[in-house]
Image: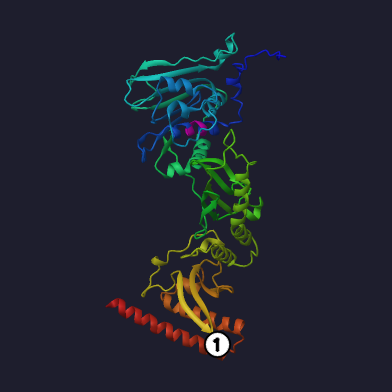
Amino acid sequence: MSKDVELFDATPDRRLLVDIGAANYTVPQAIAELVANCMDAKVEVNEFEISPIEIEILIGDDSVSIIDNGQGMERRVLGEAMRLSAIMDSVTGNTRTRKGMYGLGMKAACASLGMLWEITSRPANDDYEYVVEVDLDQWLKNENRTEWKMGVEKRKFELATSPLGSREHGTSIVVKRLRETFTIPTAVTELLGMAYKPHLESGDKILVNGFEVNPKHYELIEGSKIPINLPIGDSVVTGWVGIDKKTHNDGNYGINIYREKQLVDAWNKDFIRAHLMSSRVVGEIELPFVNANFHKNGLNKGTVEWKTVKAAMTELLKPAVKASGDMAKNKKDPTRGAKALAGLQQAYGAIVTCLPSDLTTGKESPDVSKTPKSVPNPLAHGTLGDIQFDNTTYTLSTRLEDLSDEVLPWDYIYDEPTRDLQIIINTQSRVYMYSTDPSLVMTLAISEILIGFMIKYHGYSYDKAKENRDSWLHSSLVQRVQVGAKSDK
């Protein structure tokens, strides 16, 4: 028995092209999406080299323009690009990875900005440019609601009239009859600086109303930036995590996730506890094997790949979360920041060459080189050597730090698991501020701290502690003199 089947046309109503403009894009997000298309159009010099691209964005009261010097599109490619859900790789033969995944971004972004678009494109070595004009008001007046054909006009390239100006190739998108007036470019600049930070750092250029967009800058505590190189199956998650100089109650903390050098999830907090105690944790990762959602403002989090990444990143970031929390605790302890940073470095096995003074005060470390000194400055950050008590060896190190107390000349931190004794010279103390002999300051600090340390941690009498201290100072001085004599030769 045959089936009774009647076929119906599934072509969507023409209104769909207008409705995709309600895609929940803000104006900055819509512009950022159009920039993604520009980045995908970078010119390939050869199989090993791709030219940097320059993108000019003009924001006015009645129009928004995005113009690039990319590879441009010939007539057939431009026509195909206007189809919803077009798979452009099959049209262009492109084998490079792209930011555009769904074939909807350009149309949705233009429709969210305004009702009239003019797209002009010129390929390299072509005397013509190709133009599509889309008037959504006129588009809706067509009586045939399933008619989706668009005309691509071929025009002789004229320098004086082309929106591409003097560019030898590229694409211009001009959107008019804006849905909303948007005359402040700052929000666009800030978003682009973060959304395309890897591109901007690698030589690509974006200008907004004539001003160059700078990549997002982080205010990290010196020595807290830890590289991430996390194997996940056959892929690797790369990036970094660090500790911000301040806590954030504005939500601007967590991990910025990039895919193909484009930000797809801003300030993600899935790997950390969303809490003020964790709000110093910031970082970036490149995650190429988890797809973004349609709007590129999040990831497809139902996949096995994402769940694997989440579990691994959560574990990896635990020391950073702890350091962030430790910096907010025990505010009466002026060395809490240094202790938290030391713990962070120990957890990740990193090497700190300098621990800054801004951990507790937010002030910059003083420039020791500008302080008048008559001898080489032994107060520079670094290792002083080892000392042994009761057959146990301890490592001595030193650093400068602002302890916000002009009376306290020095202090110390002792890390029992590593047996590291750090001597902290208080740069705000009168002893440091008015001394012209750093060697004397260091000698005084070592003398007092070593004696106190041996009495506290080894139960020595004062006389025994003093004897050990004097022995170390003697051998240390002899070694320094020998090193100095060799360098003079």
Across and down, in percent, residue 83 comes to 52, 22
Q: Is residue 50 toward the left or the right of residue 110 in the image?
A: left
Q: Residue at the spot x=43%, y=64% of the render?
A: 367
Q: Is residue 292 toward the left or the right of residue 471 in the image?
A: right
Residue 408 seen from this side: no
Tell me the chief SS of the magenta region: helix
Above or below, 218 against 378 in this view is above
Residue 75 seen from this side: yes
Between 390 and 476, the one lying in front of the other is 390
Quarter holding the C terminus is bottom left
Q: Amino acid at mark 1?
A: Ala
Q: Tell me if residue 35 is in the magenta stretch.
A: yes
Q: Tell me if residue 180 is in the magenta stretch.
A: no
**Residue found at the far front of this picture:** 1
Q: Is residue 465 toward the left or the right of residue 480 in the image?
A: right
Q: Quadrant of residue 460?
A: bottom right
Q: Residue at the spot x=59%, y=9% of the render?
A: 144
Magenta residues (range): 32-36
Above or below, 48 against 410 in this view is above
Above or below, 221 against 432 in this view is above
Across and down, in percent, residue 66 comes to 45, 29
Across and down, in percent, residue 463 comes to 56, 91
Between 316 and 165, the one lying in front of the other is 316
The figure's colour scheme reads rainbow
Residue tagged 1: 465
